Amino acid sequence: MVAARSTSRFRCRAPGACPLHHALRASVRIELIDDHAVVRAGLRLLIETRHGWTVVAEAAGAEDAVAAASREQPDIILLDLDLGPDRGLDCLPRLRQAAPGARVLILTGVRDPELHLQAVRLGAAGVIAKEKAAESLLKAIECVHAGETWLDRITTASLLAELAQGPRLKATTPDEARVDTLTPRERDVIGLVAEGLRNRDIAERLCISEATVRHHLTSVFTKLAVSDRLALAVYAMRHGLTTTHR
C-alpha cells in the first residue's frame, strides 16, 4: 500500500525512522536503460559520485536491457519509457522477471500521468521526471533501494482511487474485455484518430507530446489487436469509441 507524502514527491522520513538511513551506507548496483548514449554517460557520472554506487550495465533497447538484467541482477533498474523503436512499458514485466530482486525506477521525459500509473501497475517502484534536479534523482534511487516508493501527487492520487474502487467486474465478451483495458487517455487518442487527426494534431489537442501519443497508440494497437490507424478507426466506430473524453 502506498503511503501519502505532504510534498509533490515522496520524501523518506528522517534518518533513524526510515530504512533509507541504512541504505545510504549500502552498495547499490544499477542498470541504466535509455536509448541516448549521452544521457547514459551523464547518468553514470552522476550515480558513481556516490560511494558504493556502481553502474553494472547499460542498454539502449529492450532485448539488450533484459539480457543485461538477467546477467547482472542489479539492485536498481533505471528505465526510460521511450526507447526509440521499443516501449519501456512493454519491457518492464520482462525486466522484473529477468531480475526478480531488482527495483525499477522510471526516469522519463513523458509527463502523462496515465503512463506513470500504468508503469506502477506493471510493478515500477517509482517514477521521476527527467526535468527534476540531479539531487532529486539520487534521493529517488535511495528511497526505492530502501524499499520505499517515489511517486508524484497525481500518480499517487490516481493509484489510491483505483485501489479504493476494488476489482472491476469481468467483461462478458472478448471485445468488451479489450475495451475495458483502455485508459481514459487512450480513449481520447482513439476518438481523435477516428476523426482523422495526425499525431501532431492529437498532441496539440490533448496538450501532450508526440512521443506520448506514439506510446498510447502502441498500447492501443496491442490491447485491441489492430494493426494500423484505419483498422483502429473502424474498430472505434463499431464499438462506440469515436467520442473523445475530456
Image (spheres, rainbow, N blue to C red):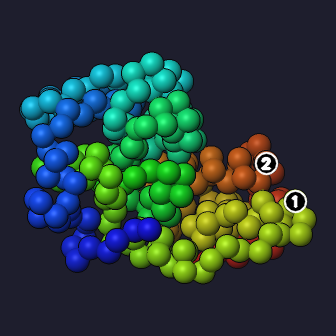
Q: Is residue 61 left or right of residue 142?
A: right
Give the x, y percent position of residue 202.
Answer: 54, 61
Closer-to-camera residue (18/150): 18
Give the x, y percent position of residue 224.
Answer: 77, 54
Quarter occupied by the N terminus = bottom left
Q: Note whether 121 is above or below 225 in the view shown.
A: below
Q: Is residue 135 left or right of residue 199?
A: left
Q: Note whether 188 is above or below 111 in the view shown.
A: below
Q: Note whether 183 is above or below 101 in the view shown.
A: below
Give the x, y percent position of residue 162.
Answer: 55, 74
Q: Is residue 181 left or right of residue 104?
A: right
Q: Secondary structure at mark 1?
A: helix
Q: Label 1: which residue?
A: 174
Q: Amino acid at mark 2?
A: Ala
Give the x, y percent position of residue 14.
Answer: 11, 64
Q: Residue at position x 67%, y 64% from top? A: 182
Q: Secondary structure at mark 2?
A: loop
Residue 34, numbered label: none
The reply to whether residue 4 is in sight is yes
Quarter occupied by the C terminus = bottom right
> How far apart in space, not on screen, are marks 1 and 2 (Cα)?
11 Å
Instruction: Please tell me how crowded label 1 is: few (under 14), some (14-19), or many (20+) other residues with Cα within 10 Å.
Output: few
Residue 225, numbered label: 2
Closer-to-camera residue (16/164): 16
The reply to whether residue 62 is in sight is no
> Which quadrant of the figure has residue 169?
bottom right
Of badges 1 and 2, the one in the foreground is 1
Q: Are marks 1 and 2 in contact (CB under 8 Å)?
A: no
Can you name the residue that lies furthest to the front here?
16
Closer-to-camera residue (214/77): 77
Q: Residue at position x 62%, y 77% from top? A: 166
